[in-house]
Amino acid sequence: MTSKELISRFKAFAINVALIIKSLPKDSINVAYSNQLIRSSSSAGANYRAACRAKSTADFINKLKIVEEETDESLYFLELIEHFNPQLKEQIQPLLKEGNSLLAIIVKSLITSKEKLREKLKDIKK
């Protein structure tokens, strides 16, 4: 998967999360969790874009760690919103699936990038 494709998936994820949030009943729980979710879901994509412009492998890894955290946080708040809005389970489940898929891609990218950085450091020490 290319970085452009992944940027597009993160953007679609944030948009689809926002659409779910717009449909939620306005109670204190939904408002609180929605505020957190809208920030984390959009932050994941924004930080992935920043990672694509990283100045070094170490910079890329640091930015990707933020993407990992924000994506995981988005999943957590989606789960909470689903718990308190079981009538939206059908709409939330695909978002959870996509979020988990994005998270898996980011985790794999982190593992690969860390391995590459270790190899670079080994070469420098030789």
Image: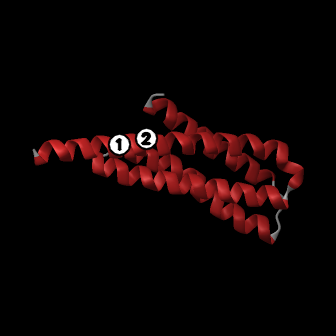
Res 70 → quadrant:
bottom right
The answer to whether residue 20 is visible is yes
- Seen at 52% across and 50% down, the residue is 44
- Seen at 70% across and 46% down, the residue is 96
Disc number at residue 80? none
Name the amino acid, label 2.
Ser
Q: Callout 2: 10 Å neighbours few (<14), some, many (20+)?
A: some
Res 116 → quadrant:
top left
Res 80 → quadrant:
bottom right
Q: Secondary structure at mark 2?
A: helix
Q: Give how far across and how far down residue 46 sits, in percent.
A: 48, 49
Q: Callout 1: 10 Å neighbours few (<14), some, many (20+)?
A: some
Residue situated in front as seen by the camera: 26 or 17: 17
Q: Residue furthest left?
A: 126
Q: Secondary structure at mark 1?
A: helix
Q: Give how far across and how far down residue 35 sits, in percent.
A: 66, 63
**Residue pointed to by mark 2:** 109
- Seen at 65% across and 53% down, the residue is 75
Residue situated in front as seen by the camera: 11 or 83: 83
Residues tagged 2 and 1 counted as in contact (Cβ below 8 A): yes
Name the amino acid, label 1.
Ser
Report the number of discs. Answer: 2
Disc number at residue 113? 1
Q: Give how far across and how far down residue 42 sits, in percent.
A: 56, 51
The answer to whether residue 55 is visible is no
- Seen at 63% across and 44% down, the residue is 100
Question: Which of the colour schemes (rainbow, by chain, secondary structure, one colour) is used?
Answer: secondary structure
Q: Give the distance between the C-alpha atoms of the residues marked 2 and 1, in whole angstroms.
A: 6 Å
Q: Residue furthest bottom?
A: 28
Q: Is residue 120 above or below residue 5?
A: below
Lateral position of residue 107 relative to residue 114, left or right: right
Q: Give how far across and how far down residue 84 sits, in percent.
A: 83, 61
